[in-house]
Amino acid sequence: FLGCHIFWHDPFSLPIAKPSLSMMDLSMIDEIQEAMDTAQVTEEGENKAHEVKKPDMKKNGDEDSGEKLEGVVTKASSPTVKISITASHDGGNIELISISEPVVSSGGRTAKCIVTVHVKPDVYTELEKIAHKQYFSYRAFVSGLHASSSSGGDNGEEEDNSIKLLTVQYVVANAHAVSYPDAWPGTTICYTTGSLEPCDDAAWRRNLTTKYQDGKLTWSQVHTANGSTFFSYWPPYTYNRHLKLIADCSTQISTRGSACSDYNPTVESLGQTLEGREIECISIGNGKLTAWIQHRQHPGETMAEFFAEGFLHRLLGVDADGELDEATKKMLDQYRLYIVPCMCPDGAVLGHLRTNSVGANQNREWATVHDHYEAPTLERSPEVYAVLSKMDETGCDFFLDVHGDEELPYVFFSGAEKTPVWGDRIKHLHGYFISSFQRANSDVQKEIGYPPPDSEEDALKYMNVATNQVSCRFNCLGLTLEMPYKDCATNPDPEKGFSPDRAKQLGRNLVEALGDVHPYLRAEGEFWSDFSGEDEYVVPTDNFKEEGFVMLKKRFYSDVRPQDA
């Protein structure tokens, strides 16, 4: 593992994983501390690849030694160290503002600089009157570092003073101007020195030096080797990976002898996006009830497609030699499932937080609720138009819309509370389903979440939200699942946080929850009289105790608060 953390003392920080002594000698640790504590670094610089030059190592006072170094580079006498910032991978999002004039420690073996960036906005959203922004993902590439050597000094050889470590303070300077600035406290950004391929999912870690102060999001990273480090608000799910997911599903479906073939699986396109990408839908199952599960309406909520991957792999026996477990087989005999792994592929490729390529927030495109704004339309939201049209053909007995939430460090659900469909039946189904999911996966809880609308009138303003519209349109149980960008407070793991692997596992466990709720989805009478007390609906609240937590200002369904817009 190549990364390590060094940070300024902050009494409100989480415990920090310190560098291992096996990774560097003690003198280098002293130089790192010197570079961080004494270097006067300014946020200046213009080049995307800034050269960190090795100082002239003559002693002060020697002939032609130049100015006294004191942590500032004055001469170059050896190869340079460079850092470059790019966001060219699909789903990348960052604007480089500056790379500061670098500082080299007096020992000459460590250097420090500041990289300042801005999060780039989505296309302006006509309905919400805002250009959303918050998600970012970019690559830092370091070159010119020299491997640590223990030679020199005592054995009479020339001491090796080449630069071996580059400490970078990364600064998101416009963090105060994002869609959800109140989400930054408690956030730890994600990084990896691995690739963006599925084989490296477990390599993602959290940078525990992350802090939000004076309107800026900052963290410090020690680069110990040449090469790439990816930084993301949450690990990206690239379009190439999406295509691989569809290909894996198609391959499994067409494989002779695959167990999923007994359940009539298909892969189809429901239409195309405005940039010409397919809106793929995988359907499978022999049951009489119809369930729709869609993911990633908001493209920056990448955990939603990791959830889809876990769910689809289990349904089709991907990575299991085509075999299906008994719980999956039973559930496939109960339902015909329609799964849309990515509702917003254009926005995903563009690195957007909440919108497609023309600025449509798809989770506000499910009905016309404003006279001046028709929705959905082929011109602005063909993704929603296509899915809703297919849903009208098939009907719907269960609906799940999979998302991520910036502020709350919990897995939670939001339902169709206070809408016309809401009553004893839907309320008890809602509570039972969440309890069933919680029994299958302990990341799930029901106490913390979005507070429901205050009144039926308030709820009617949000009939353009998918869960509300589908629940009422088909008189069915509909829910929105939210996963955290932050660490998950029910099962905290500061080093990895709520990770891609945990999102995939949550997707796998949807099988158990669907199987448990099936007998009651279209049951008549007061079927809930058989439920236990733990299955009751709980009115969610956003009020919980956490050091430094700022209570949510009243909002519904991830709305941007007017004062932030």
Image (spheres, rainbow, N blue to C red):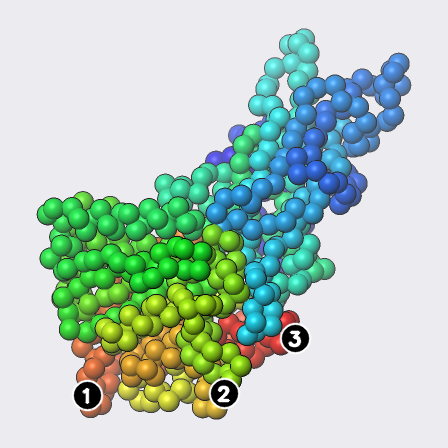
Figure check: 397 above or below 294: below
Q: Which badge, 2 or 3, comes first in the chain's sequence? A: 2
User: Helix, strand or loop at disc 2?
Assistant: helix
Can you give x and y, in whole percent of width and height, for residue 255 in the image? 16, 46
Q: Earlier in the sequence, mark 1 or mark 3?
A: 1
Determine contact: label 2, label 1, CB under 8 Å. no
Q: Residues within 10 Å of mark 2 (few under 14, many from 20)?
A: some
Horizontally, residue 277 falls left or right of residue 61, namely left
Q: What is the number of the mark on residue 458?
A: 2
Using the image, tell me which numbered label, if any, was put on residue 563: 3
Residue 115, visible in the rendered structure: yes
Q: Residues within 10 Å of mark 3 (few under 14, many from 20)?
A: few
Quadrant including the C terminus: bottom right
Q: Quadrant of residue 441?
A: bottom left
Mark 1 is on which residue type?
Answer: Glu
Tag 1 residue: 524
In the rendered image, residue 468, in percent from the top left (x then y), is placed at 39, 80
Query: Alpha-carbon distance for marks 1 and 3?
Result: 45 Å
Compare residues 143 and 214 and report the one nearer the observer: 143
Q: Is residue 552 left or right of residue 427?
A: right
Q: Where does the image place residue 331, in percent across and percent down from the top left? A: 18, 65
